Amino acid sequence: MRVAVGTDSRASNPDLNLLRELRFAARRHPAVDPAQILHAGTLGAAAALGCAPSVGSLTVGKRADLVVVPLDEDSSGDPWTALLATDRPAQLTIRGGRW
């Protein structure tokens, strides 16, 4: 079964911020591996929408769609856990390889 995370309206969330949705899922379900949660919001979501051949992972030939999120100085170990544990916002967005 494919699992995907996304946003669809402001009816259940104050904004359409996918990163906040993933962080909420991580806090709500701490037993789930953070890498699985991130997969659900990236490649899992792209597969569910039928666009995995062009987006969803950083792979040669795919669009370069990504965000840069600074992590705390003291975060060590698993970067996926650190990304989902912080509340720091994205500092940079790249869409289609463009700033």
Image (cartoon, helix red, strand yellow):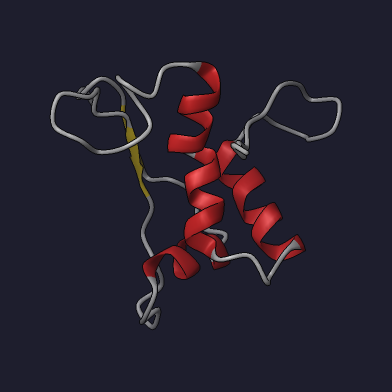
User: Residue at position x 77%, y 34% from top?
Assistant: 14
Q: Where, by quadrant of the figure, is residue 25 drawn?
A: bottom right
Name the quadrant of the C terminus: top left
- Reply above or below: 75 against 89: below
Query: Can you say whether 20 is above or below 11 in the image?
Result: below
Residue drawn at (41%, 72%) of the image: 72
Q: Position of residue 73 (x, y in %)?
A: 35, 77
* Up-down relation of residue 15 to residue 96 (above or below): below
Give percent across and percent down for residue 48: 55, 24
Compared with residue 62, is residue 13 higher up or lower down, i.e. above or below? below
Left or right position of 95 against 84:
left
What residue occupies the far left of the structure in this picture?
60
43 left or right of 34? left
The N terminus lies in which quarter of the figure? Answer: top right
Q: Nearer the viewer, residue 91 or 80?
A: 80
Q: Is residue 64 left or right of residue 38?
A: left
Circle count = 0
From the viewer's side, name the closer residue of 8 and 61. 61
Residue 70: quarter of image? bottom left
Name the outermost residue toward the front.
1
- Residue at 49% over, 50% down: 38
Q: Residue furthest top?
A: 50
Residue 4, position in %: x, y?
A: 60, 36
Residue 12 image position (x, y, % from top left):
85, 33
